[in-house]
Amino acid sequence: MAIATTMRPLVSLALPEKGAARLAMQLLLAIVGTLVLTLSAKTRVLLGPVDISMQTLAVFLIAAAFGMRLGVATLLLYMAEGAMGLPVFQGTPEKGIGVAYMLGSTGGYLAGFVVMAAIVGWAADRGWDRHPIKLFNAILVAEIVMMAMGFAWLALLIGPEKSWQFGIVPFIVGDLIKVGLAASLVPAVWSLLKRS
């Protein structure tokens, strides 16, 4: 007897069951997701010596709400918008645009966002988005993988010591706060929906 390993992510409550209407709604959600990612990249919170964007929080929430497939598709659409030269990233257009910006110091982190969406979305597809501890663990793993990718790319550009000092350490506290926020917000939404 086979046990189902996938559950429906939060967004499935708003999607038509099948057909063109479902595809159109998924496309609309992906576009809205890229707008949220852009706004979150441009929103900065001063926490210590660096400005911290809300982008990782947005990636966590989009992936947890959309599931793996739509979450990753949304992140890939966002990356495509950035590659085409749209000013969707945190440092654009001030620090460059397009593929040149993507291959700069934030390149590893940007690629890590896609992997992060896959990990968190995978967890949401298995119902972990309903449990704060399980979701926290999945998001923390995703965060560590994204930071490792960002560190590795940055280390190629400026060396490992500077990469650790400027690319990891200043973001640890802020990112842990965002991990905790995302891990509590999504299960809270599920809890509210169960009551209504």
Image: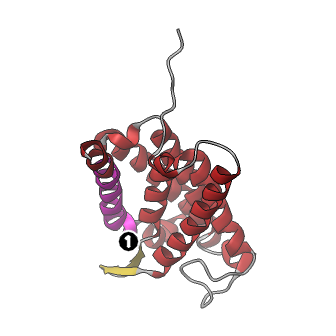
| Above or below 15: residue 155 | below
Q: Residue at x 46, y 47 (%)?
A: 13
Q: Is residue 160 magenta?
A: no
Residue at 69% over, 73% down: 81
Does the image show residue 110?
A: yes
**Towards the viewer: 13 or 82:** 13
Q: Which is more toward the observer, 26 or 65?
A: 26
Which colour style is shown? secondary structure
Work out which residue is located at the far bottom of the displayed protein and give it: 94
Picture coordinates of residue 91, whole percent (x, y): 56, 83
Q: Is residue 166 left or right of residue 185?
A: right
Q: Tag 1: Cα neighbours inside 10 Å, few (<14), some, or many (≥20)?
A: some
Report the residue at 35% width, 39% height from top.
134
The stretch in magenta equals 169-188
Furthest-left residue in this view: 195
> Which percent across, then down, holds residue 36?
50, 71
Which residue lies under the disc numbered 1? Answer: 170
Q: Based on the displayed image, in which of its 4 quarters is residue 180 positioned?
A: bottom left
Q: Residue at x 44, y 48 (%)?
A: 10
Taking the image as shown, residue 23 lies to the left or right of residue 90, namely right
In the depicted structure, whether residue 91 falls above or below residue 15: below
Residue 83 placement: quadrant? bottom right
Secondary structure at badge 1 equals helix
